[in-house]
Amino acid sequence: MASASEREQGTEKDVDYLEFAINDNSRLILSQGDITKWDANQRMLGGGGVDGAIHRAAGPELLEACKEVKQIRPGVRCPTGEARITPGFNLKAKYVIHTVGPIFESTAESAPLLASAYRNSLKLANEKNLKTIAFPAISTGVYGYPIASAAEVSLHAVAMSVGSIEEVHFVLFGTPTFNAYSKAARDIFGEPVEEEETPESTDKEL
């Protein structure tokens, strides 16, 4: 049996939590939920989607911290595919790693930028010696990246760049997104781990 949280719905079970082994030291953990309650844009000043939700949950201090990030050109603090880090303020996470995924144009044009967003986020997390990081499904909302393709690109990037991070969480909104990432995870990492193999987790960082 896979390690999973299951809700009974009639005769079917709706799985909303899965763990996969990335390597001997790191786990991929998929769950459904709201990342702002978990234990973008280039200006980094809040807006729609996940970026705006994180700003609202973190409080006004996050906006002020983002304003302190140097602009590399007018109106741009974090270009597409790059990442920046600030404190988490009112969030449960110690840090917020800000990254900007691409507006989907084509796989050839957008996939390298999406992979870069994950790689650069993981690089910052490793530089801070964080052991846990959580991502949403970057670019799959208003930016229009097809969910199945985004899942494959993002999980391959995680597999290549996890470093010393022990837990990489994807906190996914809605069953279709969770199912797409679950399929991609099985294709890349194999079947989910057994429950008794799951290590205890302590600090949660974003």
Image: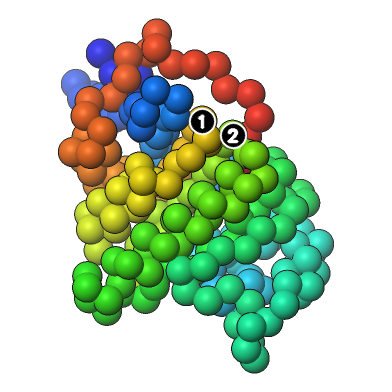
Question: Total number of numbered labels?
Answer: 2
The front one of 188 and 93 is 188
Amino acid type for the residue under numbered disc 1 = Glu
Which residue is farthest top? 196
Q: Residue at x 52, y 68 (%)?
A: 82
The tag earlier along the polypeptide, 2 or 1, is 2
Q: Vertical placement of 119 versus 30: above or below?
A: below
Place of residue 21 in the rendered image (x, y in percent of width and height, measured from the top left): 35, 27
Q: Which residue is mark 1?
A: 166
- Element carrying mark 2: loop
Relative height, residue 162 to residue 12 (above, below):
below
138 relative to 58 in the view: left or right = left
Rendered location of residue 201, percent (x, y): 57, 22
In this view, the residue in front, 170 or 47, is 170
Q: Is residue 121 left or right of residue 60?
A: left
Residue situated in front as seen by the camera: 63 or 133 = 133
Q: Residue at x 36, y 32 (%)?
A: 22
> How much space separates mark 2 and mark 1, taking CA atoms?
5 Å
| Foreground of the two, 184 or 24 | 24
Residue farthest toward the bottom in the current orientation of the protein: 74
In the rendered view of the protein, which quadrant contains the N terminus?
A: top left
Q: Amino acid at mark 2?
A: Lys
Number of residues whose C-alpha sits closer than 10 Å to that of mark 2, classed few (under 14), some (14–19) or many (20 or more)? many
The reply to whether residue 19 is in sight is no
Q: Left or right of 159: which side holds 191?
A: left
In the image, 135: left or right of 44?
left
Q: Position of residue 129 (x, y in %)?
A: 64, 39
Q: Are marks 2 and 1 in contact (CB under 8 Å)?
A: yes
State the residue at coordinates (22%, 54%): 148
Image position of 194 with respect to 18: above or below: above
Residue 92, image x, y percentages: 69, 41
Q: Which mark is residue 131?
A: 2
